Amino acid sequence: MPILSSDVDICNVAISALGGARIQSLGQNTNEGLLCGVYFGFLRDTLLADHKWNFARTRVVNQAALATAPPFGWTYAHQIPSNSLRILDIANEDEQWIVEQDQIYSDCTPLSFMYIFRQADVSKWSAGFALAMAKGMESLLAIPITGQLSGATGKVKPAAPTAATSLIQP
């Protein structure tokens, strides 16, 4: 179990790094709380879908095809679970398949497949994922909380002259 054991803990790590006011709940009626409420689920789903996290991996075994066949090119359509963020693979390595919207099209049925699901239980997350969430939240909250572009002035500093550029006269 990660040290960051709740969504609020993760947000408070990010907020504290930026010098903001800690929150008691996502969506709390403060600037920080409302921002965390907006960004947290979006970031979680994005990071989960970007990697084959062990704690968010599950499978469907022998799923029957849907009654309605795909429009063309494939024989069968299979429903993707509503909590799926990314289909990883199907059991038959030789079988070709494609994901379109909320279905997997293939030429085999029943279909067994592995996918990344929306693991919202922070206590199940790895420490690495919890840290990635905290750093991601810090990045998303930086400008709204600090009002600064990470210390950048927004001005482009001219490059120092080099031997090559000093030969060029304006």
Image (cartoon, grey):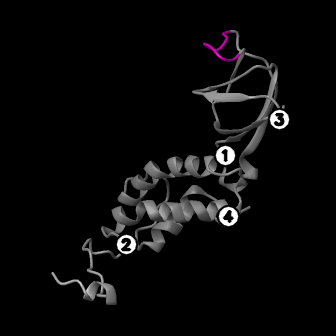
SS label for mark 2: loop
Q: Residue at x 70, y 14 (%)?
A: 66
Q: Which mark is residue 128?
A: 4
Q: Quadrant of the C terminus?
A: bottom left
Q: Is residue 118 above or below residue 133?
A: above
Q: Which mark is residue 7?
A: none
N-terminal-most mark, 1 or 3: 3
Q: Residue at x 30, y 67 (%)?
A: 147
SS label for mark 3: loop
- Position of 97 compared to 37: left or right? right
N-terminal-most mark, 2 or 1: 1
Look at the numbered discs 4 and 3 and tell me whether their residues touch, using CB distance below 8 Å.
no
Label 4 to label 3: alpha-carbon separation: 30 Å
> Is 72 inside the magenta-drawn segment?
yes
N-terminal-most mark, 3 or 2: 3
Look at the numbered discs 3 and 2 and tell me whether their residues touch, using CB distance below 8 Å.
no
Label 1 to label 3: alpha-carbon separation: 26 Å
- Position of 63 compared to 162: left or right? right
Q: Residue furthest front?
A: 167
Look at the numbered discs 2 and 1 and tell me whether their residues touch, using CB distance below 8 Å.
no
SS label for mark 4: helix
Q: Amino acid at mark 3?
A: Glu
Q: Quadrant of residue 21?
A: bottom left
Q: Which residue is mark 2?
A: 150
Q: Quadrant of the N terminus?
A: bottom right
